[in-house]
Amino acid sequence: MKKLSMSPRDSRVAAIGLLLLAVVIAYFVLLHWWFVAPLRQIRSDMVDLRDTQIRFAAAIAEKPALQQRIAALGAGQAASSAFLAEDDPNTAAADLMQRVVDVVGSHTQSGSCTVSQKVPIPNPPATPGEPYRKAAVSINLSCDIESLAQVLQALEQGTPYVFIDDLSIYRNPVATQQNQAAPLEVQFTLSGYVRPSHTASPAAPTPGTTAASSEGYRS
């Protein structure tokens, strides 16, 4: 068998190739995974932290403008005609009862309709998560059907907005025996949302506080 021999030039090329391969292997084994990769990860984390700091600094700078906008929205909300005129539930309940009396009094052209009982409901139940306070009253009417339809429609379609719940309509059997045209007996709960009280908006942070907060993100 003839022994394979290499020329001096080929030997040098092979030696250089082996040296380069050893250097690459040594780089990945000794340097890249132990030093270069962690440093690259640290640099990536620093970039992410810098972006986060920029976003927080922008949010802090916008805080006074956002507070002014919230205050303006609150003022507009308090002035809305959808709410009852008063910001106290007891006074608002009294207004609700007077509103029923006024509406009933203005819709008697089509037949008789009277308010037989009106009682405020203390601490009316609220829906979980409801942001506004509620005022409610219990109403009893004695009405002909035409007048009743007009009264209920006027209450629900007017402003401020009110809501009719637990509606019960029946005819008194004793009165029916005496008079076939006896009026309907009506019971329901009338409620509305109390006007939010206008409170002062939170104080805007001082420039020193804002600067300190931004400086804290930089550190």
Image (tube, rainbow, N blue to C red):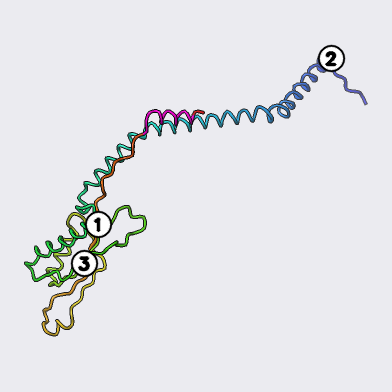
Decide: few, some or many residues near mark 3? Use Cα within 10 Å; few <14, some 14-19, many ≥20. Answer: some
Find disc 2 in the rendering and name its residue: 8
Percent position (x, y) of residue 80? 22, 48
Q: Earlier in the sequence, mark 2 or mark 3?
A: 2
Query: Element type at marker 3?
Result: strand
Q: Nearer the viewer, mark 2 or mark 3?
A: 3
Label 1 – label 2 distance at C-alpha = 105 Å
Q: Could you say which disc has been placed on residue 119 in the image?
A: 3
Is residue 188 within the magenta segment?
no
**Does 210 lie within the magenta span?**
yes
Query: Which percent across, then down, holds residue 152?
Result: 17, 64
Q: Say which quarter of the image contains residue 13.
A: top right
Q: Tell me the amino acid under the disc marked 3.
A: Val
Distance Cα–Cα, label 1 vs label 3: 13 Å
Instruction: Establish if 16 lies above or below 144.
Output: above
Q: Left or right: where does residue 55 sit relative to residue 170? A: right
SS state under label 1: helix
**Image quarter in which the N terminus is found:** top right
Q: Quadrant of residue 22?
A: top right
Report the magenta residues as a range: 205-217
Q: Residue at x 24, y 57 (%)?
A: 89
Of the pair 139 and 49, the residue shown nearer to us: 139
Q: Is 140 or 148 nearer to us in this picture?
A: 140
The residue most toward the top is: 9
Q: Is residue 146 above or below residue 69?
A: below
Q: Is residue 127 above or below residue 116?
A: above
Instruction: Please give the label number shown on residue 89.
Output: 1
Q: Main secondary structure of the magenta part?
A: helix
Above or below, comparing residue 216 to residue 130 in the picture: above
Which residue type does callout 1 highlight? Pro
